[in-house]
Image (tube, grey):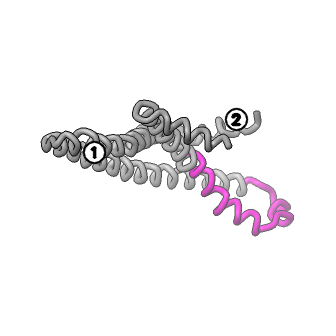
């Protein structure tokens, strides 16, 4: 229960950046979908274009691979740019809040508190907080979308291979 409360408190840090945050979330979804679609188009090239000797299908599917790769790469670049800006802003805000809090403390705190721990908190620990909100969460979502997409393709294309893969995962 405390961890969920902590996550909600962390999401309060996104105030003022919600549009950027959700736009980055959207870009992660697009990038993940493009990564899932590329192997599907490659499979279509082998199954339809090459075996059927259809040159126009080969051109269409190759073009779709290029388009999905470009869209996926562009969305990944925009995502990285947005997340870098978001992380930088959050780190500045957190450090400013910490400096203001430390400035309000009495002098005996500075005397009794270990300066190395304070330095670690101010520089290392604060940098980890935005990475939880962005990199860790978005990578989890991206991997989840990729797994769901690949499982869907395995179900529709070769369900027997999916059963074999699941059986070996359980063992």
Which x, y percent locates residue 62? 22, 47
Is 108 colored magenta in this rendering?
Answer: yes
Q: How many marks?
A: 2
Question: Which quadrant is home to the N terminus?
Answer: top right
Q: Quadrant of residue 28?
A: top left
Residue 96 visible? The answer is yes
Residue 123 in which image quadrant: bottom right
Instruction: Indicate whether residue 140 is drawn in magenta.
Output: no
Q: Which mark, residue 79?
A: none
Considering depth in this image, is 24 or 150 the residue closer to the camera?
A: 150
Viewer-proximal residue among 51 and 17: 51
Q: Residue at x 65, y 62 (%)?
A: 124
| Residue 16 in view, yes or no | no
Residue 155 point in image, percent of width and height: 46, 32
The stretch in magenta equals: 104-133
- Nearer the observer: mark 2 or 1; the answer is 1
Answer yes or no: do the residues labelled 2 and 1 have beta carbons within 8 Å?
no
Q: Quadrant of residue 112?
A: bottom right
Disc 2 target residue? 4
Q: Nearer the viewer, residue 129 or 29?
A: 29
How far from the left and from the top, in percent, is residue 90?
A: 55, 50
- Local packing at callout 2 (Cα closer than 10 Å; few below 14, some 14-19, many 20+) is few
Q: Is residue 8 left or right of residue 165?
A: right
> Which secondary structure is most common in the magenta stretch?
helix
Work out whether mark 2 precedes mark 1 in sequence or the reverse, and give the earlier one: 2
Residue position marked by numbered label 1 in the rendering: 46
Q: Identify the residue at horizontal 34%, vertical 41% (top origin).
A: 40
Farthest residue toward the left? 56
Seen from this angle, which residue lies furthest bottom? 116
* Mark 1 burial class by Cα count in 10 Å: few <14, some 14-19, many 20+: few
User: Residue 64, how many percent across, how many down?
Assistant: 24, 43
Q: Secondary structure at mark 2?
A: helix
């Amino acid at each position: 229960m405390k961890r969920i409360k902590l996550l909600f408190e962390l999401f309060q840090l996104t105030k003022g950046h919600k549009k950027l945050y959700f736009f980055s979330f959207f870009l992660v979804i697009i990038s993940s979908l493009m990564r899932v679609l590329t192997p599907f188009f490659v499979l279509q090239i082998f199954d339809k274009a090459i075996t059927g000797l259809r040159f126009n299908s080969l051109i269409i599917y190759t073009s779709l691979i290029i388009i999905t790769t470009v869209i996926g790469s562009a969305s990944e670049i925009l995502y990285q740019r947005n997340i870098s800006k978001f992380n930088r802003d959050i780190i500045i805000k957190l450090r400013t809040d910490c400096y203001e809090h430390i400035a309000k403390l009495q002098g005996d705190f500075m005397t009794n508190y270990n300066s190395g721990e304070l330095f670690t908190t101010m520089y290392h620990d604060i940098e980890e907080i935005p990475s939880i909100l962005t990199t860790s969460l978005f990578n989890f979502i991206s991997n989840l979308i990729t797994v769901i997409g690949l499982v869907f393709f395995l179900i529709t294309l070769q369900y027997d291979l999916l059963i074999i893969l699941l059986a070996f995962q359980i063992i």
